[in-house]
Image (tube, rainbow, N blue to C red):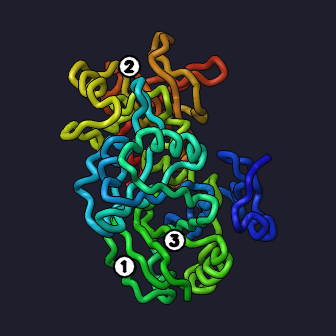
Amino acid sequence: MSKNTALTEHHIKLGAKMVPFAGFNMPVQYSGINDEHETVRQGVGVFDVSHMGEFILKGEKALDLIQKISSNDASKLYDGKVQYAYIPNETGGVIDDFLIYRIDEQTYFLVVNASNIEKDWNWISKFNTFGVDMKNISDNTSLFAVQGPKAADALQSLTELELAPMEYYTFQKGTFAGVDNVLISATGYTGAGGFEIYVANEDAQKVWDAIFEAGAPYGIKPIGLGARDTLRLEMGFCLYGNDIDDNTSPLAAGLGWVTKFTKDFVNSEALKAEKEKGVSQKLVGFEMIDRGIPRHDYEIVDAEGNKIGRVTSGTQSPTLKKSIGLGYVDNAFTKEGTEIFISIRNQSVKAVVKKPPFVK
């Protein structure tokens, strides 16, 4: 039984094709993936991503708890700043990737993946020997991602907060669409710019309607999870459950940049040893030379047909009109321009390693 978000019925009314995703009933597309993708790249579109999880951590030792469970150094945060990080497990894999928002010195807001809400909550709770007050507000919170180059113009009439000058990975709180205490951030997952709007469920419909009214002159449209996937793949952004999971090394996944050994965190010693020794495979981007769509878990092989890795994500890029993907390959094949082959229906289909983002 899939859970509904505050606006599930509204999406059905809008004619969305609904699918179960991460335990929720979610809109996968409205007008069609290519059209929606183009809307976000060129104009502005709205994703209802209210399935995501939100936790509030509060108290004198809130930072200590975050430092323990997070790979990144949250002491570098200041009020209004956001940080990307992952939660390592104790066996070399990744429990989740997540965002840390610093509200103030003793208050942090964590945003986690929908499929991992319970897992993350239990894990963080397990390490909460610091007396930190933890609240899981996931079920009461709606989240709209308004993405695209016209997002700031489309939303500005709804708030006194200055949207256009907001830097990537910062946030503000204020009145938005007549609702107080709305959190607005700029952490987009599409590479097209834009904002995330966090509101209480009871205000979700009002805010959604206001966004569409204000955005109408800019051609604003609702966008489903299908285009979210093609947009994030064009940027080479990881998706939990596809490109990283409990069994993938964060260092192999290219997450060394958010792995800070300047502090002690869960499994940091083992990860440090792994870094010194070097990983045997790395996550790379690739573009298909020959026709064929790479799918999750397809084998990647060399010219002789020997297995050298596996595809983790793949799609037909609406912008490039060719297929792209991410996958783990043996170290000898990670260099940009290296020829690799994707095994599609027992055929070796030619591809070339390319460093993301695929779309500049």
Residue 345 quadrant: top right
Residue to which mark 1 is pinned:
164
Q: Three-letter amino acid code at disc 1?
A: Ala
Which mark sits nearer the N-terminus, 2 or 3? Answer: 3
Q: How would you rate the neighbour count of disc 2 (Cα within 10 Å): few for under 14, some for 14-19, many for 20 or more?
A: some
222 to the left or right of 104: right
Amino acid at pointer 2: Asp
Given the current orientation, which residue lies at the most extreme left position?
262
Q: Quadrant of residue 83?
A: bottom left
Mark 1: which secondary structure?
Answer: loop
Amino acid type shown at disc 3? Ile
Spatial separation of the CA atoms under disc 1 and disc 3:
15 Å
Mark positioned earlier in the residue sequence (1 or 2): 1
Q: Mark 1 or mark 3: name the one nearer the start of the chain.
A: 1
At which x and y percent is residue 233? Answer: 49, 47
Separation of residues labelled 2 and 3 (CA atoms): 40 Å
Residue 212: where, in percent of width, then height? 62, 80
Q: Position of residue 10 (x, y in %)?
A: 76, 70
Can residue 191 be seen by looking at this rendering?
no
Tell me the residue at 51%/43% (across/down).
120
Observer-side mark, 1 or 3, equals 3
Left or right: where does residue 208 sit relative to residue 183? right
Q: Which residue is the site of mark 2?
A: 330
Tell me the residue that label 3 is attached to: 197
In the image, residue 227 sits, relative to residue 70, either above or below, namely: below
Q: Secondary structure at mark 3?
A: strand
Q: Is residue 344 above or below residue 219?
A: above
